[in-house]
Image (spheres, grey):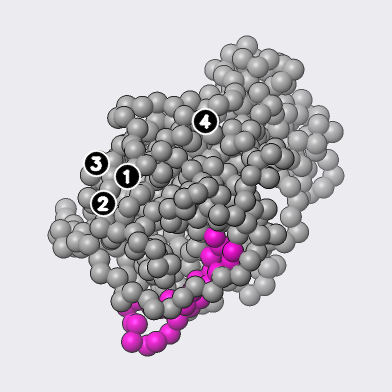
Amino acid sequence: MFTKSQFLAPLLALPYTLAAPTNRSISWVDCSQDVGVPAECGSLPVPLDYMDEASGKTLNLSMLKVKANKEPVKGSIFINPGGPGNDAQSFLGLFGREMLVMTGGHFNVIGVDPRGTGKTLPVNCFGTPLELISAGLQLPPAIDAYDTALGTTFAVSKVIADSCYENLGEVGGLIGTAYTARDILQVVDALGEDGMLRYWGQSYGTVLGATLAAMFPDRIDRLVIDGVANIHDYTDGWEYDNLGVGELALQEFLKSCVKAGEEACPLASKGSSADELFAIINDLAEQVRHEPIVLGSNVTTDIVGFAQITGSLDISLRISVEYAPYLAGYLNAVLDRNATAYHTYRSFLFPDNSSPSTGAEATFAIRCSDSVFRANELSDVEERAARLTAASRLFGGGYGSSYMTCSQWRVNAKGRYEGDFKAKTKNPALIIGSPYDLRTPLKSAVNASASLEGSVVLQHNGHGHCVLYSPGQCAIKAVQDYFTNGTLPAPGTVCEQDFDVFSGKGVRDSFGTSSKADNETSTAA
């Protein structure tokens, strides 16, 4: 059965026209103290609604530029760290130096806060922080956590969707990936460089990257997408391509644990093989799904249920080289019912934060406005939910909450791209994927490459989500060469992560950004 969008796809896939190039300039001010390297914060007024530019209404895009530290300066690279819902400025505050290394140093690195994030049209779905916290507490940890979890999730998700609709109003339709893509091209034009876009995006940033390529293929000079989401699943609103890769990532973590031994990985004391440890952790997750473990007297922190086990895995496996010892210690402490060790390791994995984050609200606003599937009744999602939980007992149910909210979202992003995402960019793209990425499988990178003519897939065997969080010199150099010289790796190239996850080395050891010497050489161009 064909949908309307499938009939229209050949027309909708044609390159988009952008608003007339802006004659506005970017207002830059020094904010190096916030990043640790020479940087400037800026803002640029752009059309609030690209479908109604005649209104004259604008919004101020908020952005941060980390200055190139090598001569000659060759222009600017735009980045998106993922989410959706992560603001680019905070990301560059944490990883500005690493991004200079990753991109070769000859380019300014610019992070534009997408609509709904940071200071760019921030989202507020609830009247008070307490309401936000309350909504989160009402959601089951997974749609299969207990017999009534699916129905409860559907009901709470409707409340969240309705609250967002009531509080966002017409702004909800102005927050979406296609409008953010147009915003970025406005900034490209305002820079007054060569008018071409150089872009690096990870995770959700690959959705934005694919959208930019599809809408403006002739404006793409360089495009790197890493940790690639299935763009068609994302557009639907329910993502299935990533199911099962979480278990594979856990298996690889456990292999490293057994290899490292009990001194480096205390969890190794519980089994002699990765398969044995995997079965033990699965059994633990099933046990606490039905009967949580109590390891103290604080009702907020000391009850270990299904969400705590799967949450510890999700947090840690995204950046195993940093979190592996803490995850191993945490799981071992729970298995031993050791409250002292549990509290020690828990503080690393789940740091207390008295200020609730609005990131979830931005995630809903962007993801849900982009998605097309809608449900009126619980029965409309039951088959989809069953597919999630059948494919991944540990992780599938956890994804269901956001998908349920999007299914009941009451506004669609305006100007949404509805083509097939096939594009021939001015220069071919570099696409990176790992078989051990718990969020975005390698097959999604391969599928994306089939839609981007001439692109090359680099397989990076990193134990984490994207090269930045599982770095290796091979992959870093490939990105540097691509941005600096336009050189793509040979098809079939496979790279490895620099350090084992129990080596005691971290992300900044690979990038060389933890030393005083590096700090001193990161100077303004």
- Which comes sooner in the sequence, label 1 or label 4? 1
Is residue 518 something one can see in this rendering?
A: yes
Badges 3 and 4: C-beta atoms under 8 Å apart? no
User: Which label number is shown at residue 429?
Assistant: 1
Badges 3 and 2: C-beta atoms under 8 Å apart? yes
Instruction: Give the main secondary structure, helix, strand or loop, of the magenta stretch.
Output: strand
Q: How far is disc 4 from disc 2 in space, using C-alphas? A: 27 Å
Label 1 environment density (alpha carbons within 10 Å; few <14, some 14–19, many ≥20): many
Q: Amino acid at mark 2?
A: Thr
Report which residue position mark 2 lands on: 425
Instruction: Give the x, y percent position of residue 88.
Output: 54, 58
Badges 1 and 2: C-beta atoms under 8 Å apart? yes
The furthest residue to the bottom: 55
Instruction: Give the x, y percent position of residue 282.
Output: 58, 28
* Magenta residues, start to end: 40-65
Camera-side residue of 369 and 177: 177
Report which residue position mark 3 lands on: 454
